Image (spheres, helix red, strand yellow):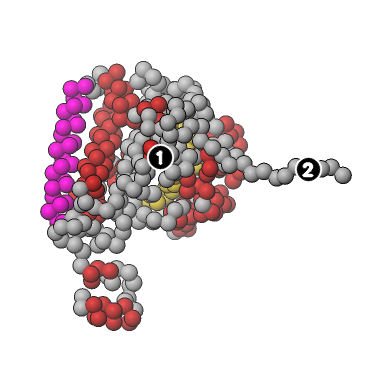
Amino acid sequence: MTAYGPLTLHVPEPAVRPGGTPDFSNVKIPKAGAVPRPEVDVDPESIRDLAFSIIRVLNRAGEAVGPWSGLLSDEELIEGMRHMMTLRTFDARMLIAQRQGKTSFYMQHLGEEAISCAFRKALSPGDMNFPTYRQAGLLIAGGYSMVDMMCQVYSNSRDPLKGRQLPVMYSSKEHGFFTISGNLATQYVQAVGWAMASAISKDSKIAAAWIGDGSTAESDFHAALVFASTYKAPVVLNIVNNQWAISTFQGIARGGSGTFAARGLGFGIPSLRVDGNDYLAVYAVAKWAIERARRNLGPTLVEYVTYRAGAHSTSDDPSAYRPKTESDAWPLGDPIIRLKNHLIARGAWSEERHKQAEAEILDTVIAAQKEAESYGTLHAGGKPSARDMFDGVYAEMPPHLRRQRQQAGV
């Protein structure tokens, strides 16, 4: 009889711990322009390799190269860069506000601005996003009021959500931004269901699901892929792989699949990886996937390879679980700097214009902040009415809630 040794359990470990030298040798980066652009109606089986590569447009010299390039004009790219700069400035001001006690909580997008800002540009009016808390660029690039965003963060008297959501959990049906849920991964199933409903009703609107790398370990992620692939729902399934969950590196959630995009292959879903810090590449891939959905070709899964340069939230200290200099070592660079360098290389931008834009955007954000704070902050000024907790919940208020509202005197 064969004798076996004791069973062992494999626990993935990050390449480096705090105090060590950052190591991104596991991120295999192909040359910009090297990954082919298949036809939109391609057979998913024939592009399996795209789930293991990275689609890039901008090379190290700031040039746009390859089959995924050439989709945006200089004016459109300048607008996109301003959106990213606005989001970064918005983040910086709200982070300071949290440290000043004006709000309880905040989450930055530092290093990830290109993903949501470029994706929003590829959508059409009426399309619906089911986002996480790190896709505020969908609102910024969609023209949503920064004052309203700040009022939601402050939970003040002008808060569009009447104080019923955590800060940064925005909602705007008019801007295609479904209410954010604090429960991880629930939005993935909701996005697929919304897309199925759109198809059943013979509408033309598609859905976009968003999830972080850590939350792909949730069962709702897999359930969404089952329904999306079975019914060929008109949905784009986005995974933002920023290398870290709250304090856990991506290898825990990724498991043995090699990449997050590879998760889609077992469901027969075309799956691609894209450089999430390359505005042009993100837009091109988003446009491709959205067209597939709109032409009734089914879902597409897209993994955005990026890096969370900041803390997970204002409650997090990343130096406790990763090297302090790891952000500087990220090989795909900063999305704003890369797009700026591209525009300068094309003669459409300059360092002087960039500095001027930074100053203009800062003035605009500060003006919005002053207006928002005039309606109150967490600990000062106006607040939503207690009555608001009863309104807008049911089409017809049930008797027990009516009695509670009367007892509360609101």
Q: Which residues are magenta?
A: 351-376
Q: How many marks?
A: 2
Residue 358, magenta (yes or no) = yes
Residue 312 figure quarter: top left
Q: Mark 1 is on which residue type?
A: Ala
- The image quadrant where one finds the N terminus is top right
* Magenta stretch: dominant secondary structure: helix
Expressed as whole percent of the image width and height from the top left, the position of residue 294 reads 44, 45
Q: Residue at x 29, y 18 (%)?
A: 345
Q: Is residue 287 left or right of residue 393?
A: right
* Neighbours of disc 2 within 10 Å: few (<14), some (14-19), many (20+): few
Q: Secondary structure at mark 1?
A: helix
Q: Secondary structure at mark 2?
A: loop
Q: Is residue 334 left or right of residue 154?
A: right
Expressed as whole percent of the image width and height from the top left, the position of residue 301 reads 50, 42
* Neighbours of disc 1 within 10 Å: few (<14), some (14-19), many (20+): few
Q: Mark 2 is on which residue type?
A: Tyr
Q: Earlier in the sequence, mark 2 or mark 1?
A: 2
Numbered badge on residue 4 = 2
Q: Give the residue at mark 1.
A: 320
